[in-house]
Image (spheres, rainbow, N blue to C red):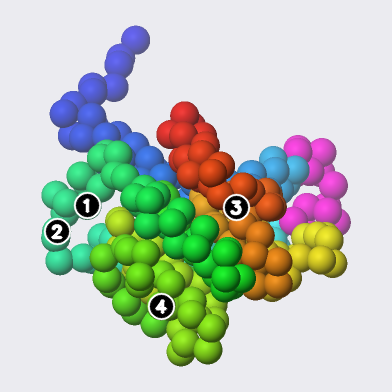
């Protein structure tokens, strides 16, 4: 029996493909992409079974769906593909791209300014919506707001959310211990939530349904502090427990 020779080029080919797939996996963690992939695989398996059973009508219908599958994938994963291509084309070059794939980068912000600002704004019933980036790419959310790119601090957060200030509407996005942008627009959840939830709380749930971000919300009506993560929200958190509530979700992410 003749064996196909396994060369260094074959090894390099497999390594590059594995790196590419791992990079895509890291970029889509915390989003709905894995569920969409599962749906696509499920449809393909059904199509294979239908072909084997010669069910012509259903085979024709599914065949049409499969034939436009690549276009559908491009449409469905447009944000992820855009971010992926942007990452490849950045000025740092290919070596930095590979480092980003394998390196475990940390976007975890320093909690003290966030906790202090949230507690002080809660005391004055100043509404606030603070998004803490983790691994998910939130560049689209950042692009929807006003670029700040300033060092994270208590006065900065309080000035942004000060009532009637130009940037107080919308969300602040914190990334790499910096306020990346303010007045950002978040997707509002379409889930069935209590009617008592305001726009800030619905937006907090919405962004955490499609990313691994942690969101701190301060209610303008009650001054209550909430933390959203994974499509769920914990409301009326005591100020002394706020840091612990945020940190628990960071630790939860590190265990994955």
* Residue 232 included in the magenta stretch of the image: no
Residue 216 in view, yes or no: yes
Residue that carries the numbered disc 2 in the rendered image = 93
Secondary structure of residue under mark 2: loop
Answer whether residue 53 is magenta in the image.
Answer: yes
105 is higher (above) or lower (below) than 12: below
Question: Tags 1 and 2 in contact by the CB under 8 Å rule?
Answer: yes
Q: Position of residue 241 (x, y in %)?
A: 56, 42
Q: What's the magenta region?
A: 48-62
Q: Quadrant of residue 83?
A: bottom left
The mark that comes first in sequence, 3 or 4, is 4
Q: Residues within 10 Å of mark 3 (few under 14, many from 20)?
A: many
Q: Nearer the viewer, mark 4 or mark 2?
A: 4
Give the dominant element type of the magenta stretch: helix, strand or loop. helix
Q: Where residue 93 appears, x then y in whole percent?
A: 14, 59
Q: Mark 1 — residue?
A: 97
Question: Which residue in the protein does label 4 denote?
Answer: 159
Give the label, 1 or 4, closer to the camera.
4
Q: Real-space Cα distance between discs 3 and 4?
A: 21 Å
Q: Which mark is residue 227?
A: 3
Separation of residues labelled 1 and 3 (CA atoms): 33 Å
Q: Depth check: 51 or 90 in front? A: 90
Position of 55 with respect to 103 (left or right) is right
Q: Residue 237 shows which numbered tag?
A: none
Who's the residue at 25% across and 47% down the image? 100
Between discs 1 and 4, the one toward the N terminus: 1
Q: Secondary structure at mark 3?
A: strand
Q: Does 148 sit above or below residue 56?
A: below
Residue 172 falls in image quadrant? bottom left
Disc 1 is placed on an element classified as helix
- Residue at 44%, 56% (x, y): give it: 116
**Between 57 and 173, which is closer to the camera in this rendering?**
173
């Amino acid at each position: 029996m003749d064996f196909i020779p396994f060369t260094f080029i074959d090894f390099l080919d497999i390594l590059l493909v594995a790196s590419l797939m791992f990079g895509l996996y890291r970029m889509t963690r915390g989003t709905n992409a894995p569920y969409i992939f599962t749906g696509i695989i499920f449809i393909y398996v059904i199509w294979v079974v239908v072909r084997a059973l010669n069910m012509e009508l259903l085979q024709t219908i599914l065949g049409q769906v499969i034939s436009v599958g690549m276009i559908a994938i491009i449409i469905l994963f447009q944000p992820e593909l855009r971010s992926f291509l942007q990452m490849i084309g950045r000025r740092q070059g290919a070596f930095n791209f590979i480092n980003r794939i394998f390196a475990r980068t940390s976007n975890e912000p320093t909690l003290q300014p966030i906790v202090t600002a949230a507690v002080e704004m809660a005391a004055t019933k100043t509404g606030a919506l603070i998004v803490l980036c983790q691994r998910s790419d939130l560049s689209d959310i950042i692009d929807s707001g006003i670029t700040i790119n300033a060092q994270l601090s208590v006065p900065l957060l309080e000035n942004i959310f000060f009532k009637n200030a130009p940037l107080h509407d919308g969300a602040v996005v914190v990334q790499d211990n910096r306020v990346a942008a303010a007045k950002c627009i978040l997707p509002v959840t379409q889930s069935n939530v209590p009617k008592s939830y305001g726009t800030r709380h619905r937006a907090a749930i919405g962004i955490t349904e499609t990313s691994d971000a942690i969101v701190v919300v301060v209610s303008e009506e009650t001054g209550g502090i909430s933390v959203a993560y994974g499509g769920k929200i914990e409301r009326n958190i005591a100020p002394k427990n706020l840091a612990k509530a945020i940190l628990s979700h960071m630790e939860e992410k590190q265990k994955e």
